[in-house]
Image: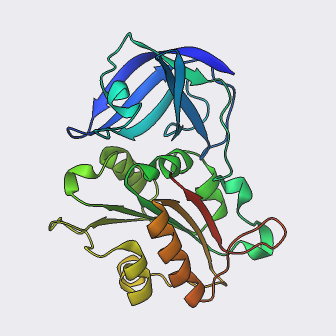
C-alpha cells in the first residue's frame, strides 16, 4: 500500500551519495527493515527498496541512497528537495533485524556488523536503539567504502562512540585511498587475514560472536566463506547459527 510522503530534508554526503528525510504515514517498524520509494514514469510505477536509517519512533523516515547514472529511480530521488512529494510504502518489511539473531545461550558476547556502501543504513538504525547495547558486551561496526568521502553518518557514529566508549568499536575500511585509522582491505580479506579482529581487539568465533552482514552480493558471499572457515554457521530459523545476511540488491 502506497502513501504520499513529503521530503523535509536532503543531506548530500558527496556528489552521488545522499540521504532523504521524508514525512510519511508509515506504520511502526523494527530497526533494520526497509521500505520502498516509487514514482510513476510513463504511467508505470518504478519502485526500489531502501533500508530505514532512522530508528523507530521518529516522526519521519530516512533513507541513504546513491545516484546511479542509468538508474530508473535514484537520479530522480537525488533531484528531490524539501517540499517535494514521493510515494512511500506504508509498511516496512525485512528480516535484517536483531529479532532474528539468536538469544540466550546461543547469542554470544559480541555483535559484529559488516556493511558496504549504503548498506550501513540498517545498522545505523539498530545502533540508535537500546537492543545492541543491552544484549551484547561489545558491538563492532565494520563499514567498507571505496573513498573516504563515501563514509556517511560519521557524526552519528561518533555519537555512538561517545555514548558507549567501552562497548562500541568502529572500523572504517577505505579501499582506494589512504584514510586516517582505516583499513584498506576488502571485508572478506580482512576477516580471513585476521586484520579486522586485530583492529577490533576481538576474535571472531562461534562461541562468542554474532555477525550481521549487509551489502553487495559478492562481499556477502566471500565474507560468509571466510566466517564459515572460522567455524561460524549461517543463522536459520530452523537451525540457529551466527551469520545473518541481507543482500542489498
Q: In the displayed structure, would residue 147 be above or below residue 192?
A: above
Quadrant in which the N terminus is drawn? top right
Q: Is residue 211 left or right of residue 190?
A: right
The percent coordinates of residue 60 (x first, y second) are 52, 23
Whole-percent x, y for residue 46 in the image: 51, 27
Residue 167 shows in the view: no
Residue 150: x, y in percent?
26, 51
Count of numbered circles in the view? 0
Residue 37 appears in the figure: yes
Extreme residue in the right direction:
238
Q: Residue at x 71, y 71 (%)?
A: 107
Q: How is the image coloured?
A: rainbow
Residue 35 sits in quarter: top right
Q: Nearer the viewer, residue 57 or 233?
A: 233
Looking at the picture, does residue 219 appear above or below residue 84? Answer: below
18 displayed left or right of 238: left
Residue in the image at 67% along x and 80% along y: 233
What residue occupies the far front of the structure in this picture? 42
Q: Is residue 25 left or right of residue 239?
A: left
Identity of the residue furthest to the top in this view: 83
Residue 42 appears at what percent x and percent y?
46, 16
Q: Quadrant of residue 104?
A: bottom right
Amino acid at each position: 500500500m502506497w502513501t504520499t510522503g513529503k521530503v523535509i530534508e536532503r543531506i548530500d554526503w558527496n556528489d552521488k551519495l545522499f540521504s532523504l528525510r521524508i514525512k510519511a504515514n508509515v506504520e511502526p517498524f523494527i530497526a533494520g527493515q526497509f521500505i520502498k520509494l516509487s514514482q510513476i514514469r510513463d504511467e508505470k510505477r518504478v519502485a526500489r527498496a531502501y533500508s530505514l536509517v532512522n530508528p523507530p519512533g521518529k516522526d519521519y523516515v530516512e533513507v541513504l541512497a546513491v545516484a546511479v547514472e542509468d538508474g530508473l529511480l535514484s537520479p530522480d530521488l537525488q533531484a528531490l528537495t524539501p517540499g517535494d512529494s514521493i510515494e512511500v510504502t506504508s509498511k516496512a518489511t525485512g528480516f535484517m533485524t536483531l529479532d532474528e539473531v539468536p538469544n540466550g545461550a546461543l547469542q554470544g558476547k559480541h555483535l559484529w556488523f559488516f556493511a558496504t556502501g549504503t548498506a550501513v543504513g540498517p545498522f545505523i538504525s539498530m545502533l540508535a536503539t537500546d537492543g545492541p547495547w543491552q544484549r551484547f558486551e561489545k558491538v563492532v561496526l565494520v563499514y567498507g567504502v571505496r573513498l573516504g568521502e563515501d563514509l556517511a553518518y560519521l557524526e552519528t557514529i561518533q555519537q555512538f562512540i561517545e555514548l558507549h566508549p567501552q562497548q562500541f568499536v568502529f572500523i572504517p575500511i577505505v579501499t582506494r585511498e589512504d584514510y586516517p585509522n582505516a583499513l584498506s582491505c576488502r571485508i572478506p580479506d580482512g576477516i580471513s587475514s585476521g586484520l579486522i579482529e586485530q583492529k577490533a581487539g576481538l576474535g571472531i568465533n562461534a562461541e562468542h560472536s554474532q555477525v550481521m552482514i549487509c551489502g553487495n552480493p559478492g562481499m556477502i558471499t566471500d565474507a560468509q566463506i571466510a566466517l564459515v572457515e572460522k567455524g561460524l554457521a549461517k543463522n536459520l530459523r530452523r537451525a540457529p547459527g551466527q551469520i545473518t545476511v541481507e543482500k542489498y540488491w
